[in-house]
Image (spheres, rainbow, N blue to C red):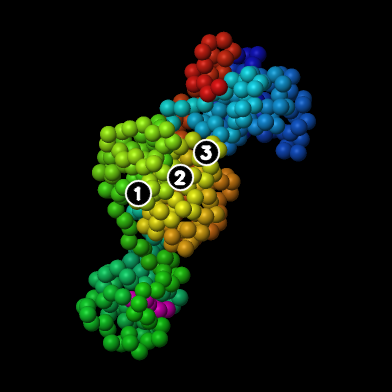
Amino acid sequence: MESLSVLLLHPFNAYLEQELDRRCRLIRFWESPPERRDEFLRAHAGSIRAVVGNANHGADAKLIDALPALEIVASFSVGIDRVDLAKCRERGIRVTNTPDVLTDDVADLAVGLAIAVLRRIPQADRHVRTGQWKAKGDFTLTTRGVLINVGCGAHVDEPELVSALVEKRLGGAGLDVYEHEPFAPEQLFGLDNVVVVPHVGSDTEETCMAMADLFSGKKVGIIGLGRIGLAIAKRVEAFDCPVNYYQRTKQAYPNYTYYPSVVELAANSDVLVVACPLNANTRHIVNREVMEALGPKGVLINIGRGPHVDEPEMVSALLDGRLGGAGLDVFEDEPNVPEALFALDNVVLVPHVGSATHETRTAMADLVLGNLEAHVLNKPLLTPVV
Ligand code: DGY
């Protein structure tokens, strides 16, 4: 491959970059400042025969048009939504991706996110790291804090709560449960910072470690039962979770329940996982109606692509409590993440790391290299898309 000039769009994998450098003529796109990219491409246009991109850095029409000698686009990703496939077909440019080797990784992350959201693992981790557990136990007695208890009276040390409120070490309380029901401590009746109906105060999450929810047995709805969707189904079956699914071209699976629309799937699931490819049909496949069907106890997991979900709608559904929680690996405008999500404890955010393990990323790099080699040697491509 020594004579093959390869344009690598981004430094996303050190091993791949090193091997491309060793085996081909490597051109690093990021070495040219963004404002001089056109000039840079003009200088290399005649020689670049291959482009290597990934999930976020693809070969769009502008790039393809700028490279008249381009023969192959090898994507370091399974999703090829960033590659202009129509343009590639028109020009006879070959396209490859990296399927299969990342299936387990992405499925592991989907299940991990669902468990993290329901079991509130990041919140529990913060509770320990910030010293809350050791210093204050399950709730914090600060003058600003407001304690809401809609769980069970026995969760709270009631005499301690009463004295904290009377001595103004605690800012207020909203209670609908008591230690010795039907009796509520009479000292509370005279306090105007105490309400005896549930009332969600904005400081509550800061001061309390909220109860978590069980994952085992939850109904899991999967949008797209391809390689990754099936790997997720296999994993959640082991948690005794009934599996529901939606797919555009229905294939029957005896152990899984098919729903003919995403809204019906959401209405019949506790956890909804997006695992289909992104294309014109699946853009915003999770819209307001779907999120409303999933409901205030439902959890949305997106390990597909950000544009699968109507992000502003999701943010407002989470903020209003119309959606119960979310575990997100992908976002509409990566690496930008809606800041409103940062304050929500029922949301777990990770930076598009579905395939980011040492083993998988190396296997993906080897596939990219294998495809380029096959192309140069005029052999069948390992994982052709076009
Ligand atoms: C892919 O390869 O398409 C995935 O997004 C990687 O996480």
Mark 1 lies on a secondary structure that is: loop
Q: Residue at x 53, y 42 (%)?
A: 283
Q: Quadrant of residue 1?
A: top right
Q: Which residues are magenta?
A: 170-175
Q: Are marks 1 and 3 in contact (CB under 8 Å)?
A: no
Q: Main secondary structure of the magenta part?
A: strand
Neighbor class of circle 3 (other Cα within 10 Å; few <14, some 14-19, many 20+) is few
Neighbor class of circle 1 (other Cα within 10 Å; few <14, some 14-19, many 20+) is many
In depth, the one of 375 and 22 nearer the eye is 375
Q: Which residue is mark 3?
A: 281
Q: CA distance from mark 1 to mark 3?
A: 22 Å
In this rendering, the answer to whether 356 lies above or below 363 is: below
Q: Which residue is mark 1?
A: 269
Which marked residue is nearer to the observer: mark 1 or mark 3?
Answer: 3
Percent coordinates x, y for residue 82 in the rendering = 59, 34
Q: With 199 as the anchor, is 66 left or right in this view?
A: right
**Magenta stretch containing residue 343, yes or no?**
no
Amino acid type shown at disc 2? Asn
Q: Residue at x 64, y 16 (%)?
A: 4
Residue placed farthest to the bottom in the image?
190
Q: Quadrant of residue 104?
A: top left
Amino acid type shown at disc 1? Ser
Q: Which residue is mark 2?
A: 302
Mark 2 lies on a secondary structure that is: strand
